[in-house]
Amino acid sequence: DAGVTQSPTHLIKTRGQQVTLRCSPKSGHDTVSWYQQALGQGPQFIFQYYEEEERQRGNFPDRFSGHQFPNYSSELNVNALLLGDSALYLCASSFRGLNQPQHFGDGTRLSIL
Amino acid sequence: AQSVTQPDIHITVSEGASLELRCNYSYGATPYLFWYVQSPGQGLQLLLKYFSGDTLVQGIKGFEAEFKRSQSSFNLRKPSVHWSDAAEYFCAVGQGNFGNEKLTFGTGTRLTIIP
C-alpha cells in the first residue's frame, strides 16, 4: 500500500520563476493538504483541497495556488518566486471524516537562488 | 487563534533512559491533538493522536501521550529510549469539523540520544 508520494524530491529555481509541485495521496484518501516547512521551523498550513475545491487556506499570499484532480492527486503552484520561498513543501492526505489523521509524504525541497 | 508551544528546543537523553517531551496548546474548543516525528530529510510520521475518550493514548514505537485539559497539555512519553528515536518531534492541534482540516504545529523539539 503506497503512502503519500511527492515529486520532485528536490528543485532549484531562481527568483521570479514559477514552480509546480505534485502529490499523490495515500490509497483511500480523498483530501490533500499542503504545508511549508522552513529550516528549523514547524510546518505551516498553506491550504487543503477536497472534491477539487480549496476548503481551507492559511496565511499565504495568492502567489500560492493549487489544484486537485478527479483522482484526488494535487498540485501546488507558486508564482513569482522569492528567496523566502525556499523550504521543504510537504503534502499530507487524509480521509474526510471523524478521527482521520493526516499522513505526510517526504516532501519536495525547493531552493531559490 | 489556536497555537502550540513546545518549550524545549533541544533535549539530550541517554539510551535506555525515560523521555518526556512537553506540549502546550491554545484552542477554544475540544482539541484534536497529534504527535509527529521527523527524521532528517524525511516527511512526518504520525506517532499518536487524541480525538476524544481515554486521556492516555498509546502510539507506535512504544510512545504514549497524556491529554490534560486543566493544564492545556499533551506531553509525549517513552519509558526507555533507543538510539533510533533521535529525531525532531512535533506536536500539533487540528481544527475543523473533523479535526483534520488544518493542523497547527509547534516549532519542534530535537531529541539527541547519547550512548
Image (spheres, coloured by chain):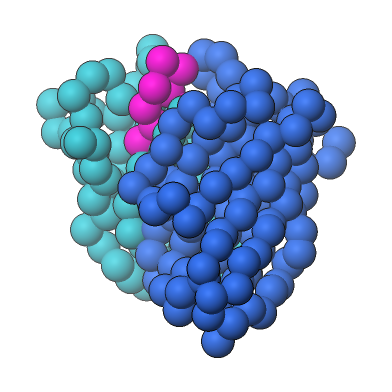
Chain colours: A blue, B cyan
Residue at x 62%, y 51% (from the top left corner): A76
Q: Quadrant of the C terminus of chain A?
A: bottom right
Viewer can see residue A100: yes
- Say if B115 sits above or below A45 in the image: below
Residue at x 48%, y 56% (from the top left corner): A63
A55 left or right of A26 in image: left
A46 left or right of B31 in image: right
Q: Report the number of numbered marks.
A: 0
Residue at x 33%, y 70% (from the top left corner): B10
B46 left or right of B98 in image: right
- Say if A15 sits above or below B84 in the image: below
Does the magenta portion include B99? yes
Q: Position of residue B16 (x, y in %)?
A: 49, 62
Does the magenta portion include B15? no
- Please, which residue is most extreme toward the right here? A1
Residue at x 68%, y 57% (from the top left corner): A21
Q: Which residues are magenta?
A: B92-100
- Say if B92 sits above or below B110 in the image: above
Q: Quadrant of the N terminus of chain A?
A: top right
A99 left or right of A42 in image: right
Q: Position of residue B101 (x, y in %)?
A: 46, 28
* Location of residue B57 by image quarter: top left
Viewer can see residue B65: no
